[in-house]
């Protein structure tokens, strides 16, 4: 069920249900231990790196309604930047965001 999301600065993003729900993970591109970046009981998916590689945008329902969130590469400071009241559709686990500068 793992779905790749992107790469930047020697790191890869992917989403997985390994913890029981969809979460975003980050792992060094050369191998290493994956780290659960979003670590929330909500559904978090569709991640992409910011253009400067310092943060990650992802889709989530972590506050009870769908939106686009941004989080630091260390999992700090999650912030909802855009509400998406209608959600992302039925195929949301297979979608991912695209970030342009």
Image (cartoon, rainbow, N blue to C red):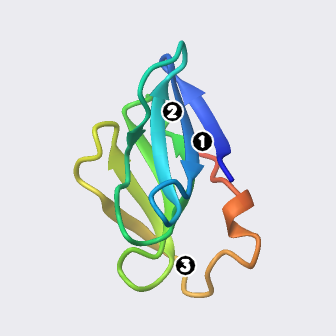
Q: Nearer the viewer, mark 1 or mark 3?
A: 3
Residues 80 and 63: in front is 63
Measure the C-alpha gap from mark 3 to mark 2: 22 Å
- Looking at the image, residue 10 sits to the left or right of residue 3; the answer is left
Q: Residue at x 58, y 42 (%)?
A: 14
Is label 1 in contact with label 2 (beta carbons under 8 Å)?
Answer: yes
How would you rate the neighbour count of disc 2 (Cα within 10 Å): few for under 14, some for 14-19, many for 20 or more? Answer: few
- Looking at the image, residue 40 sits to the left or right of residue 18; the answer is left
Measure the C-alpha gap from mark 1 to mark 3: 19 Å
Residues 53 and 44: in front is 44
Task: State the SS at label 3.
Answer: loop
How would you rate the neighbour count of disc 1 (Cα within 10 Å): few for under 14, some for 14-19, many for 20 or more? Answer: few
Indicate whether 10 appears above or below 23: above
Q: Work out whether mark 3 precedes mark 2 in sequence or the reverse, and give the earlier one.
A: 2
Q: Which residue is mark 2?
A: 51
Q: Residue at x 63, y 53 (%)?
A: 97
Task: State the SS at label 1.
Answer: loop
Measure the C-alpha gap from mark 1 to mark 2: 7 Å
- Looking at the image, residue 35 sits to the left or right of residue 74; the answer is right
Q: Which residue is mark 3?
A: 84
Query: Which numbered marker is on residue 100?
Result: 1
Q: Work out whether mark 1 precedes mark 3 in sequence or the reverse, and give the earlier one.
A: 3
């Amino acid at each position: 069920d793992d779905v790749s999301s992107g790469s930047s600065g020697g790191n890869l993003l992917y989403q997985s249900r390994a913890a029981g729900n969809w979460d975003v993970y980050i792992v060094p591109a050369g191998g290493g231990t994956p780290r659960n970046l979003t670590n929330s009981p909500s559904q978090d998916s569709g991640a992409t790196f910011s253009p400067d590689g310092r943060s990650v945008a992802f889709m989530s329902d972590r506050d009870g309604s769908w939106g686009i969130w941004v989080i630091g590469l260390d999992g700090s400071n999650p912030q909802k930047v855009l509400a998406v009241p209608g959600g992302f559709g039925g195929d949301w686990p297979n979608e991912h965001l695209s970030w342009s500068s």
